[in-house]
Structure formats: structure tokens, C-alpha cells
Amino acid sequence: MEIVSGYAFAGPALDLGALLWDGQCLPDAQIRIPLAMLNRHGLVAGATGTGKTKTLQLIAEQLAAQGVPVFLADIKGDVSGISVPGESGEKVAERAREVGQTWEATGFPSEFYALGGIGTGIPVRATITSFGPVLLSKVLQLNQTQEQSLGLIFHYADQKGLELVDLKDLRAVVTFLTSDEGKSELKGIGGLSTVTAGVILRALTAFEARGMGDFFGEPEFDTSEFLRAAPDGRGFVSVLELPAVQDKPQLFSTFLMWLLADLYNDLPEVGDVEKPKLVFFFDEAHLLFNGASKAFLESITQTVRLIRSKGVGVFFVTQTPKDVPGDVLAQLGNRVQHALRAFTPDDQKALKATVRTFPNSAYDLEETLTALGTGEAVITVLSEKGAPTPVAVTRLRAPESLMGPVEAGALEGAVKGSLLYGRYAEAVDRESAYEKLTARQAEAEEAAAAVAAAAEKGSAKGAAKGGGSGSVVDQVVGSGIFKSLARSLGTQIGREISRSVFGTARRRR
């Protein structure tokens, strides 16, 4: 059969399951993905409850077993079980028998992270400087004009060595640039309107009021931590726990993009490799693309296209392929499509659009995609030669780790027992833009007071002699000391930061 021969790869591969044909599961017809093709990216799609999370777990287990680190975003809190052996039972035994799987309960080396330390996990933080204006604009829901103004603010801060570590740093710089002393600083490169500055400041205040300020600060997370292997040679599974922030989809989806962009910035070019350096699963992918500007989408497309040559594979996880823009979808060589619903006209439209994204096949895909059971999927991947394999309806294997969350106490113990916990647990508030601007402003005010006192004393002497020496205000504002201090607020004290995709900062090594 053509389908079976299409998946008979010679090199290392991941075993996904067994072929379903004419209502029968064929355990001798194994459907696989070549390990070397995992950096050609992929899509895992399907309606809620069709088994997408278990598919991620299955793929992550096999990657880790072959020494490939994996990053997973755990939206609902049910992926943590990958760290402990699964539980055998009648359903698991039956599935293993059907698909020709030798099932053995196995846990995999795992690290658990939490955005800003909200929830259970090693805190993942980013500095405002590193996050960059484009991603921050999406989080703050700014329009294109406001995004451009924010980029101008970042450019100024980068040039002047004003480190934007947390939200109060950015607020301080915006406030300074709209003050009487700071307005002239941006005149040569476009200026910052008071109205736009006000919108940005209000957005920052609202953002912080929703409890999201903790995500920005230091120590900043080093994404190279995701590339580690365990002492036994298996790859670490890095699980970003998101249940505590699942009501903040704009934030966590954009933060996932920052993690990916940071990896892109820092990793060297390696070309085609025998196995990926990392496979990154981007869950709830539609949240990233909703309301995205053209520039933002272009940056995503560029990142996905180029990060392959750095040995990183990216799998987008969502409900239907139409959630992913065409330019991005075209780069996803591996497809696992779970069942779709067709209850409404919109559902039917999405179903027809999904069918058109698959190669020609021997199946009636419109009918097949609505009839798939839980844990079944339509699959096509890239062969070892880079050509699409025949479309195969597949009954997927059962994960060997726990299919559900670990107990809260065990999760907390795993987090605090990690070697990384001490490195990132405690937030640090070092001197940055806020402290520098506040100190300089205080210095300027003290100097102004001293000049004013001297001027008042001089005026008194002049009056006693019957002569005028001008107003005290004129003397203070016109004094060389005051002008010097005012200018010092904009003095360049550091080299300009180099920025890359999304305007994210390149990490200084």
C-alpha cells in the first residue's frame, strides 16, 4: 500500500500510531515522523476534547527520550503529569494492543516555570528593554501610531543608557520626555505628543492594575535553559504552567512569542541537523494572531522561517488551520489534524478550508474529519527527503507518562528542588531608568534651589544699592548650572542597544 511505504523511514523517527483503513486499525502499518524533519515545524489542530493535549504529550515524550529538549505551554494545568510514570489500565492496554505499542509507564525529566512567578513554577521574567516595543504594544493593545511612538521611546532609552527593567522605568522615561525639561530631547527625531504619551501611560497603569507588572523585571530568564539535557541523556521537558494567567491570553501568547524570538536572536546557525536542538509547542496559537498588525505578522513569519536553520522546530497548536495566517501555515511541514465539528455554517466553512490545506488523498476528508474519534487524527508529514507523505488516518499511541496533572505538593516540590529555582526565584530591583531619572531630577532641583537662594541674596544686595538684577526666575532658569543639569537628563551614558526581530534586544554575553 502506498500509504504504508510512505512512512517506512530508515532513520530515527517518532512513532505516532497505527494506520486506520476501511474502519480497521492496522498495527503493522506504523505512522511516523522522521526526527530530522521536526525542525520543519508543524501544526496540531482539532476541536476541543479531540485529544490535542495527549498528542503533544506523546510527541514530547518521544522527543525527550531521543535527547531532544521540548518546550510546552500548559494552559489548563494538565500537562505536568509528563514528569511521572503513567497509570496502566484497561483502556491504555486496549489502545496499546490496537496500535502495536509496547507500553511501559515512564516519567520524563521536567522543569516547571510560571510567568512572573504567578502560580507554581520557576519565575520567568523579561525586562522591558529586552521585550521590545512591538511585543509590548500588542500586550498593551496600542494602535499603530502609538506603537511607533513607543518605539521612539525605546530608541531614546537605548541611546541614553536608560535601562528599562520594569514598568516604573518605562513610565519614568515617558513622563520625562513629556516634561518641560525633556520635550526637546525627541524634537530631532519626531517628538512625542502629549496625547499619545497619555494613552501609553494609561495603558501601563491599567496593565499594572490587573496584576501584570510582575512579569517584567530581573533576573531575566535565559531561554538557553530550555536546551538542557538530563544526566541520562534525555532532553528536558520545560513546562510553562499557565493556569494562573489563563484569563490573560494576550499576555501569555505574546510572552511565548518573546521566548521564541529570544531563542532566535541568541542561537547560532546550524543548518540541517540530525535532530532538533529544541521543539517548541506554541499552544492556543490563534491568540497570537488575533488583532495582529501587518508588521507583527511579518515578524512572526520571519521568525518561523529562519529559526529552522538554528535547529528549532515550532509546532502551532490551535483548533483549525484557518487560525494561522497563510504565510505561516505554508511553512508548517508536519500536520496532525484531529476531529472538527460541522454544526454551524462557520464550522462547515472551516472544515472545507481545512480539507483544502491537505495534499490529495484516498480519503473523503470532509467526512473523515467529522467522524474521527478521540485520539485519532489525519496526518501528513515530511519524509526524510523533505517531500510530503501520503495522508494517513491514524489511531494514536497512548502516552507513557501520567495523562493528567501531578498533585500540587509534588509539583511544588519539583519546582523548589530544581537547580534553577535559586537562580530566578527572588526578584531583583537594581538601579535602572527610574532610579537614574529620579536621582538626576533631585539633583537638578537641589541645584535650582541653590541658584535661587544665591539669586535672592544677590537681588537683596542689588536692591540695597538701588539697582535691579532681573527676576529670580530668569536668573535660575538662565543659569549655567541649571541648564547643565537639565541637559544631563538626556546625556548619553551607554551604547545603543542592538535590536532584532520584533525590536527585541539582543542578549549581551
Image: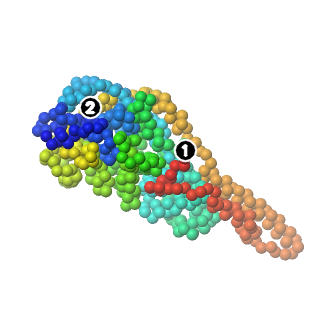
Q: Mark 1 points at which residue?
A: 218
Tell me the amino acid under the disc marked 1: Glu
Is 496 left, or right, of 98 in this rendering? right
Q: Is residue 382 above or below residue 120?
A: below
Q: In which quarter of the image is residue 491?
A: bottom right
Is 403 left, or right, of 485 in this rendering? left
Q: In which quarter of the image is residue 338?
A: top left
> Looking at the image, which is closer to me, 220 or 206?
220
> Looking at the image, which is closer to me, 272 or 236?
272
Q: In which quarter of the image is the N terminus?
A: top left
Q: Name the residue under label 2.
A: 398
The residue at the point 70 percent across, 61 percent down is 485
The residue at the point 35 percent across, 50 percent down is 287
Is 505 left, or right, of 299 in this rendering? right
Q: In this view, does 99 lie above or below 48?
A: above
Dot 1: element: loop
Residue 17, percent across and down?
23, 35
Residue 17 visible to the viewer: yes
Dot 2: element: loop
Q: Which of marks 1 and 2 is nearer the N terminus?
A: 1
Residue 206, percent across and down?
48, 52
Q: Quadrant of residue 448?
A: bottom right
> Looking at the image, which is closer to me, 88 or 21?
21
